[in-house]
Amino acid sequence: MIFLLLVSTIFPLLSGSLLVSVLWPTTARRTASLWFRFWLALGAGLGIASLNLFLCTLLTGSINRWFILGEAGILIVLFAIRHHARTKPNPTYDGPVANQGGLASILRAVFFITLLIQGIVFGSLSLRSPHGDWDAWIFWNMRARFMFRAGTHWKDAFSTLIDNPHPDYPLMVSANVMRLWTYVGGETPFCPIMLAFLFTSATVGLLVSSLSVLRGRTQGLIGGLFLLATPFFIRHGADQYADVPLGFFLLAAVALLSFSDETTDTNKGLLALSGLMAAFAAWTKNEGLLFLVGLLTARWLVVDFWRTRRVRLRTGLLAFVAGSLPVLLIIFYFKTRLVPQNDLVAAQGAQTASKLGDLSRYVITAKAFLRQALQINSIPVLVLPFYALFLGTESAQVKRPAVVASSLVLVLMLAGYFLVFIVAPYDLELYLRTSLDRLFLQLWPSTIFLFLMVVVSPRRVAEERLTGREDFRVQTADTSP
């Protein structure tokens, strides 16, 4: 079984690597850049694998191994595109070199020790609950199991006769679980555990590597430590919840948007890849659709403020839409032809107006949001404000279009979540208690990324103090060797 699982990872790694290679504009070969591309490739490859399985199931009428031919065909096409693209010149990126020195070495040691400890915690939680927790039972693994067993009746998994509160949830996680089960030939719980571990690891790796490329290795390691020190991140990863994969794709879209702003040209490839990652988020959970719309809206608003770069930014918007369009077409078919209407939308009616006018619902929801944001069992939430006050921010980073747009979309996401709770047809306090921490988890990796994009690196502060300078809020990124 282990051998078959290793074989099953070949296609996601190859397909994702080829796709990222085709769209990647930089000629840099630094280690951090290579790791950045590796984690992006893993996520993109898993997204492609889930879409391929879904389309092959749709065409053949049942779950079977014909999808492996589809994977082979995709690899052939991507190889051909990659061979053609090799002759095209690419713009370069002259960003921060990974920091070396005492502070980076200490942080690296602390990071890997923390990573090892949290890996043991993940394994322990998975052994204790090999089938995950509630959402894994009722949504992702149950739907995968139903479709895997149902043969030609696989569409019955979306029937309203099944007591499922969210019958329209997309298939990123479930399709990948089915794919792994098909490779190994049975429903072993090790497959969803492995998938959860891949996305949990990829989120940490992507955060560290993207910040290392854009802001220096010190910032990258600090970002990884902040994420690993968040208890519910590892717990929900081991719970096999889709919120961790969703958080990965949100982070990927935001990081790619920032990376495109740092390069020397209008990088349509990076922006198309960002759009693809945002679309994969929509293929993971319904909240991803809100993110995609919010990111497009935020980016468009930013275009009107950066008038000197308006042509470049508008071109980037078209590339972003082009990257997301193929996945969005599949989601549109899935939502309109296969699954019933979303339960939250279907439940709206005459009571919606009264809920919107009920002040008590706003008070209850606002208190729950505040409690979640200030939860005492999350060390980073307590540390981040003091960290920013002590080190200061870089005004040049704060004003970057990608940082502004990405920060705005996180605010729009929180506003959207807030509104959903106001009009939700469920018991409000129970709904908040059982889902709010996971909604915050979706945005947490991107929040850490944006925070460390604008906060001055500790290494820079230490160097400035040693040289006797008083102004630590520099205008450039941390590029010290």
Image (cartoon, rainbow, N blue to C red):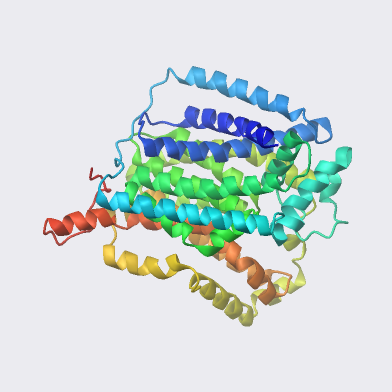
Quarter of the rendering containing residue 194? top right
Going by the picture, which residue comes out furthest to the left?
468
Q: Answer left or right for 135 relative to 439.
A: right
Q: Residue at x 72, y 51 (%)?
A: 140
Q: Is residue 447 above or below residue 171?
A: below
* The one of 221 and 108 positioned closer to us in this rendering: 108
Q: Position of residue 183 (x, y in %)?
A: 73, 34
Q: Answer left or right for 421 relative to 212.
A: right
Q: Residue at x 43, y 54 (%)?
A: 113
Q: Position of residue 34 (x, y in %)?
A: 42, 35
Quarter of the rendering containing residue 236? bottom right
Q: Residue at x 47, y 33 (%)?
A: 269
Please tell me how many numbered marks the rendered image carries.
0
Q: Position of residue 190 (x, y in %)?
A: 69, 46
Q: If the image is split into quadrants, where does the C terminus sit?
A: top left
Q: Residue at x 76, y 60 (%)?
A: 343
Q: Position of residue 398 (x, y in %)?
A: 33, 55
Going by the picture, which residue comes out furthest to the bottom?
360
* The one of 211 and 204 positioned closer to us in this rendering: 204
* The one of 53 and 202 positioned closer to us in this rendering: 202
Q: Is residue 148 above or below residue 405?
A: above
Residue 266 in view, yes or no: yes
Q: Is residue 233 above or below residue 264?
A: below
Q: Answer left or right for 335 relative to 74.
A: right
Residue 304 in view, yes or no: no
Q: If the image is split into quadrants, where does the N terminus sit?
A: top right
